[in-house]
Image (spheres, rainbow, N blue to C red):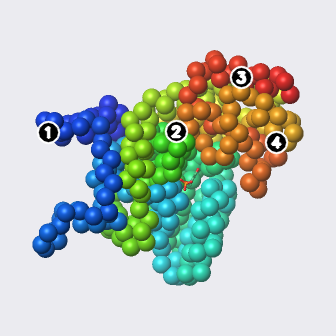
Amino acid sequence: MTENTRFKAGELLHLRGQSLSRGEPVALPLVQSSMYHLPGQPDESPGYGRVTNPTWDHLEHVLAHMEQAPCLAFPSGMAAIAAALFATLKAGDRLLVPSDGYYVTRRLSERFLAQLGVSVEQRPTATFADGGFEGFAVVFLETPSNPGLDVIDLKEVSSAVRSSGGITIADNTTMTPLGQRPLDLGVDIVVASDTKSPGGHSDLLMGHMACRDESIMEAAREWRTFSGSIPSAHECWLLHRGLESFEVRFERMCTTAGVVAERLQDHPAVRSVRYPGLPDDPAHALSARQMDRFGFLLSLTLESEGKAEAFINGCSLLRPATSFGGLHSSAERRARWGDAVDPAFVRLSVGCEPVEELWSALKQSLDNL
Ligand SMILES: *Cc1c(COP(=O)(O)O)cnc(C)c1O
């Protein structure tokens, strides 16, 4: 990865300030308007709220700085994923999705794309490249997979898909552009849920799509305008505010996750731990090559479903909740949603609590089992 493709976190904080005129507010204004003053012939100026909004334009400017690629904002991660799929697929195409990735992507594909004539196939992340990619119009990737934390080689897979004439879409929600840069590794489109760590305060749903191909971006922009899948100005404003502290939060979360993963491994109540940063994790070597950080998500398997529930609910610094990436650590048993994992498998999203304070709360709850 070359230095100049990395976004600069300091510059992100000054993207707006650098273009201000005297007397303008330093903080991003929240503009709530469906109409714009538009006398005479329409031109490039804003015309209608479904097409453009100054608050969302600036958010996209910041997202584009992070991705180092043009970005479109959406009202949720799934809205971004839907836009990427509907903008790239047509009847007769074959789509490959991970069988162990975010389940709503599979549901969307099977429920709606299949009935429009797209054939949808699935493969597990751990053996994703087996069988090659010949004949697939679109290959959808998610790495590390959620919740299993298996990893796909983005460089190898995107180049194999490209040479067989297809395009790749990577769901980068778990790593974010701070932890992994799929576009720089050859992936065509990045989609992500900003509901998670980029928002970070568990008070909004948002998503975005990033892509360096102009015609794909134009199709996705048309999809957004025509389907009406647009973010609200208020959500854009909130996400923008979250992004200003994102680098600080992400650093803290990843560093703490590394410490917690190592200590969990040594606790007698824990049967196994998955974290790409652990030297003996099956995904470690590849993760070290393609990821900038090892992330803030880890999983641990306890002795039984009952003990897993007791661990989560008995820890004062863990919110028993689905979703992840908040300032506050959270955890859940993924089997409760039907994921193909052990009933005692817990996904833990490490938050921004000071590491020793968090560890003593986790240890206390494990000691009590
Ligand atoms: C949460 C999530 C999504 C969906 O995002 P929403 O903002 O909830 O629509 C997609 N992919 C992954 C990996 C996720 O974790």
Q: Are marks 3 and 1 in contact (CB under 8 Å)?
A: no
- Determine the CA span between mark 3 and mark 2: 21 Å
Binning the other alpha carbons within 10 Å of mark 3 as few (below 14), some (14 to 19) or many (20 upward) gives some
Judging by the rendered image, the residue that carries numbered circle 4 is 344
Judging by the rendered image, the residue that carries numbered circle 2 is 201
**Residue at screen point 17% across, 71% down:** 42
Number of marks in the image? Answer: 4
Q: Position of residue 67 (x, y in %)?
A: 38, 47
- Determine the CA span between mark 3 and mark 4: 19 Å
What amino acid is at disc 3? Ala
Q: Is mark 1 within 8 Å of ligand 1?
A: no
Q: Quadrant of residue 285?
A: top right
Residue 361: which disc? 3
- Determine the CA span between mark 1 and mark 2: 31 Å
Mark positioned earlier in the residue sequence (4 or 1): 1
Mark positioned earlier in the residue sequence (1 or 2): 1
Q: Is mark 4 within 8 Å of ligand 1?
A: no
Judging by the rendered image, the residue that carries numbered circle 1 is 21
Binning the other alpha carbons within 10 Å of mark 4 as few (below 14), some (14 to 19) or many (20 upward) gives many
| Up-down relation of residue 183 to residue 99 (above or below) | above
Q: Are marks 1 and 2 in contact (CB under 8 Å)?
A: no
Q: Quadrant of residue 286?
A: top right
| SS under mark 2 | loop
**Residue at screen point 64% across, 19% down:** 357
Binning the other alpha carbons within 10 Å of mark 2 as few (below 14), some (14 to 19) or many (20 upward) gives some
Q: Are marks 4 and 1 in contact (CB under 8 Å)?
A: no
Q: Position of residue 10 (x, y in %)?
A: 32, 31
Mark positioned earlier in the residue sequence (4 or 2): 2
What amino acid is at disc 1? Ser
| SS under mark 1 | loop
- Determine the CA span between mark 3 and mark 1: 49 Å
